[in-house]
Amino acid sequence: MQLLTDDLFQKNVLRNFPFALVLFETDWSGHSQIMEMILDKLEGAFGQRMAFFKTNVEMSENISHYFNVARVPTIILFRDGEPIDRISGIVAETDLSSRIQRTVSTHG
């Protein structure tokens, strides 16, 4: 997963990819680390259809505030730069995989 900063967010998520997933996380959150491991696996399965990114909410405060991210981890799925799904907290790999599959199938 590529690390996004405020500067790279608009270029990468809003303009370059029809489907993107962004993990909003922190370095100190064990739950964020768990979700990052799950997303690393899912990127292997869905990386051809959806771009995977992460951003540290403490280093990219503008993005976090803009999307009202109040807890970590939070995952937002984007289609053509618009948020279409949001998941907060830990979610099982199978559930997240289903939501990603549904997103790229329904909106693709």
Image (spheres, rainbow, N blue to C red):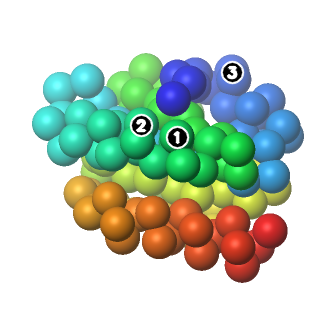
Q: Are marks 1 and 2 in contact (CB under 8 Å)?
A: yes
Q: Nearer the viewer, residue 25 or 46?
A: 46
Q: Is residue 91 left or right of residue 107?
A: left
Mark 3 Cα-neighbour bin, 10 Å: few <14, some 14–19, many ≥20: few
**Distance CA(mark 1)–CA(mark 3):** 26 Å
Mark 1, Cα crowd under 10 Å, few <14 / some 14-19 / many 20+, is few
Q: Circle 2 sits in a helix, a strand or a loop, which is it? A: helix
Can you say whether 5 is above or below 93 in the image?
above
Who's the residue at 41% across and 28% down the image?
A: 56
Q: Say the numbered circle drawn on residue 44.
A: 1
On the image, the x and y values in percent for residue 59 come to: 43, 21
Residue corresponding to mark 2: 40
Q: Name, please, the residue furthest toward the bottom.
A: 106
Can you say whether 13 is above or below 27 in the image?
Answer: below
Instruction: Give the secondary structure at mark 1.
Output: helix
Q: Nearer the viewer, mark 1 or mark 3?
A: 1
Residue 64 shown left or right of residue 58 in the figure: right
Residue that carries the numbered disc 3 in the rendered image: 7
At a point 62% along the width and 42% down the height, the residue shown is 47
